[in-house]
Image: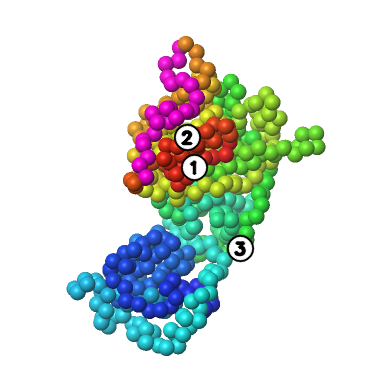
Amino acid sequence: MDWIRLGNSGADLTGVGGRLQDVGPEQLAQHCRRDDAWLAIRGNVYNVTPYMNFHPGGVEELERGIGTDATKLFSQVHAWVNYDSILKKCLVGRYRPRSGEGSSPTSPEVGLGVFLATKEEKEKHNVGRNTPTQPPPRKLRYDWYEQEERGSIVLYCQTQEPSVKVTLGEDNKDLLLLVCEKGEIQSLHILLENDIVWPPRLIQIPNSSKVELQLKKSKPGHWKTFGHLLQENNVPSTCLHYSKMKVNNIFSVNYNTKILALSYLDQTFSTTPVGHHVRVRNVFDGEEIERCYTPICKSMVEPQSEEDQTLIYLMVKKYETGLLSSWLASRSIDDILEVSSPEGSFQTSCLINRKELYLFAAGTGFTPMVGVINFARKIVIGKCTKISLTFFNRTEKDILWKDELERLVQKDSRFTVSHVLSEADETWTGLRGRVDGELLRSQLPSRNPQDEPKAFVFVCGPTAFTQLTGGLLTVMGYTNKDYHCFQG
C-alpha cells in the first residue's frame, strides 16, 4: 500500500520526466547502480530505483537484473507477478535491442501497449515530473521460516551492518526487535505462538543486508503461525538510549588494560555495527562524565558462541589521569554500568571493490580495527585478499592482544601485523619510531589517481596521530574516499 500511495502521489518515478523513450542495450547498461537502476522486462524498460526498498525479495535480488534485459531472470523467479501494474509509474519506455537480441518489442507478452498509448497517463507523468520523490517511511520487512526444532525470522534491512536489539519477555514468548539504521529505529513486536529458549542466535548473512534471527523452540513441533504481530513502528532515532548493564566477567589483557564483559539486566542483547561505538557514563562529584568505547569480540580466532553474542566486550585501559577509565578499570563482577546504544557514521559500503585493507592503529585505537578485521574476514564486500595491521605502541608490554594477533596470523594467511615501538628496549628486533611518511610508504602501495583504487586505509589513535596520518595519506595521493579516520 505504501508503494501504491507513492505511485499515486504525482511524483516522477521514471527519472526522465515521464517522457517515454526508446532505450537500447548500451543506454540500459549505463543504469546499473543501486541509486540509478533500470531494467527491461518483456520489451519495456523500468526505472526501479524508487522501488528498491519496496521489493519483497530484498535489494540484492533486484540488483541481479539492473542494467540488463531481465526478462529471463524475472520468468525464472516470479513469472506470475503482475509487474506491469506494479511498475507502470516507473516506465521509461520501450526496449529496442539489436536485431535478434533479447525481448522482441512486438512480443504479445508486452502487455503495456494501452498504457504507452494512453494520453491520460502521459499527462499524469508530465504533471508530476518536477515533484520531488518523498517515499513514505519504510517499514521493516521480514519473513518467517520454521523447522521442527527451530524457527527463523529473516529481516530485510537497508545496510549490511544494522544495529539490532533483541528482547525476550519473561514468558519467553514476547519478542521485541529493534533495528536502527540510517537515522531511524524500526521495531517489530511479536507474541510468539509458543515459547522459545534464550538466547536466540542472530546471523548476519554474508554479502547481504538480510539478518536471520534463529529461535530454538522449547518443544519441537510445527507451529500453525509464528505468532501474533502486536506492533510495528518506524520512528526517527534522534538521541542515544542508555541501558543499565552489569559486569558479567573480567579478563586481563596486560598490566593496565582489561576486558569487561557486560550483559543486560533482562533477556536482551544487541549488536554494534562495524566502526561504531557506545558511551559509558557515570557521575563524579555531581558532574556527569562519559567516554566512548568500541565494543570488540571475545576472540578474533575462536568462533562466537550464542552466549558470547549476548555480551558486550569493552577493552578498558586505565589512565592515571583518567577519571572514568580508572573507575571502569576498578569495576568488579555484578557491578552496574550505564551504557548507550551504538552511534557512529562509518558505512561498510565504502569497501566495495576494495581488495586490500591497511590498518594503522596507535594504543587503544586498535579496538575499532577488531570489527574491521572481523568484517573483512567473514562478511566481505567483494573479495578481500590482504589485511595489513600496523600497530604503534610505546613499549612491548603495551601491545594489546599481542598473542591473539599472532594466533590470527597463523590462522588467516591474508592477515599480517607489524608492531612499531617508540620506546623499545635493546631486545626489540621489530620496527621502531613513530608514524611518518617513510614508514607509511613502506607499508602502503603507491596511489595512482588514474588507476582503479583497490586499497582502503583505516586510521585510529590519539588525535595528533590520526591527524598526522591522514595528512600524510593525502600527500601520498590518497583521497578522502580511500581512507577513514576513526575519532580517538
- The image shows residue 109 at horizontal and vertical percentages of 29, 80
| Residue stretch rendered in magenta on the structure | 427-449
Q: Label 2 is placed on what type of residue?
A: Leu
Residue 332 is at least partly visible in this image: no
**Crowding near the residue tagged with mark 2, few <14, some 14–19, many ≥20 C-alpha atoms within 10 Å:** some
Q: Which residue is label 1 attached to?
A: 484
Gap between marks 1 and 3 measured at Cα: 33 Å
Residue 455 is at least partly visible in this image: yes
Query: Which quarter of the rendering shows the C terminus?
Result: top right
Tell me the mark number nearer the camera, choosing from 2 and 3. Answer: 2
Which residue is most to the top?
426
SS for callout 3: strand
SS for callout 1: strand
Q: Which residue is found at the position 45% from the left and 58% from the top?
A: 146
The answer to whether 130 appears left or right of 268 in the picture is left
- The image shows residue 68 at horizontal and vertical percentages of 31, 66
Q: Earlier in the sequence, mark 1 or mark 3?
A: 3
Q: Label 1 is placed on what type of residue?
A: His
Q: Which residue is label 3 attached to?
A: 233
Magenta stretch containing residue 444, yes or no? yes
Asked if 325 appears above or below 242 in the picture, the reply is above
- The image shows residue 6 at horizontal and vertical percentages of 52, 74
| Tag 2 near tag 3, CB within 8 Å | no
For the stretch drawn in magenta, the main secondary structure is loop
Gap between marks 2 and 1 measured at Cα: 13 Å
**Nearest the eye: 386 or 221:** 386
Q: Label 3 is placed on what type of residue?
A: Asn
Q: Which residue is label 2 attached to?
A: 472
SS for callout 2: helix
